[in-house]
Every structure is written in structure tokens, then in C-alpha cells.
Image (cartoon, grey):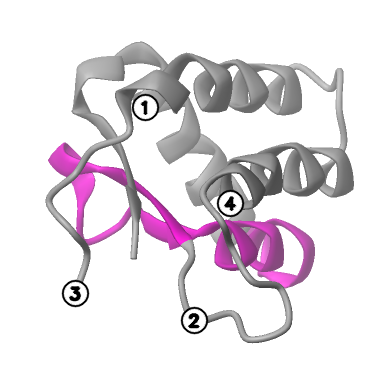
Amino acid sequence: MKEDRNYIKYRKFVLDKFRQYLSGEIDNHTLNQDLHTIQNELGFNRQRGIKCVWLENIKYKKEFSFTINQLWSDLKFGSTLTQERVKELMQLSIDNPKDFKIYYS
């Protein structure tokens, strides 16, 4: 269960990374590394992986609620349809930033 706290201070950073990825400025590996800096700041333990950052668009919660690793995996290993849908949801989050939430649980 995700905590109620929404880390608004990271919103611009994450949405900027989404923009950079969608425009081809960064690749999926760099996106993944950059987003993991948030988990590192919040005390993520890579060895145990107990807590992680959740990226969620509240308007599309059933479709867009990912951990950073799930996002990376869908963009790297997902079908073309899955990859395109994730990119579409990333763009929807960029276009509607107030609906984009970041949780740590």
C-alpha cells in the first residue's frame, strides 16, 4: 500500500526526465538511472529493495502506476504496444502535471 505522502518536490524533475526521454535526449538506461536518484535520496536500499518510489497518474491510476524498475522494464522488454502506451501515459503526465504523483513505500 502506498503512503499518502506525495513528493511534489520531485515532480518537475521526473516530468523533465520523461520529456527528455520522449524527445530522444536520453535513453531508457539514463532515464532509469536518473529516476533512481530519488530513491537514493529517500534512503532506498538496493540490497533489500523493501521500499521503492511509485510514479502514478491519478487520472489513469489503473494504467499508470509504476515503480521505476517496472517503468524501465516495460520500456525495454514490453511489446511495442506496451511501450507506446507507457510513452502515451508519460506524455499525459507531462501535459497534466497536477495529476502526477510520486510516492515512496
Work out how far the residue at label 1 is from the one at label 2, CA to CA, in angstroms.
Answer: 26 Å
Query: Where residue 30 appears, x then y in whole percent?
Result: 86, 39
Q: Which sits in the foreground, 104 or 95?
A: 104
**Quick check: 16 left or right of 30?**
left
Query: Where residue 90 appears, x then y in whole percent?
Result: 48, 34
Instruction: Name the residue tied to disc 3.
Output: 1
Instruction: Name the residue tied to disc 1.
Output: 93
Q: Where does the magenta region start and end?
A: 53-81
Three-letter residue code for mark 2: Ile
Dot 3 alpha-carbon crowd within 10 angstroms: few under 14, some 14 to 19, many 20 or more = few
SS for tag 4? Answer: helix
In this rendering, the answer to whether 49 lies above or below 61 is: below
Instruction: Name the residue tied to disc 4.
Output: 39
Q: Which sits earlier in the primary sequence, circle 1 or circle 3?
A: 3
Query: Where residue 84 appears, x then y in whole percent?
Result: 58, 46
Q: Which sits earlier in the primary sequence, circle 2 or circle 3?
A: 3
SS for tag 1? Answer: helix
Work out how far the residue at label 4 is from the one at label 3, CA to CA, in angstroms.
Answer: 17 Å
Work out how far the residue at label 4 is from the one at label 1, CA to CA, in angstroms.
Answer: 20 Å
- Residue drawn at x 59%, y 80% as measured from the top left: 49
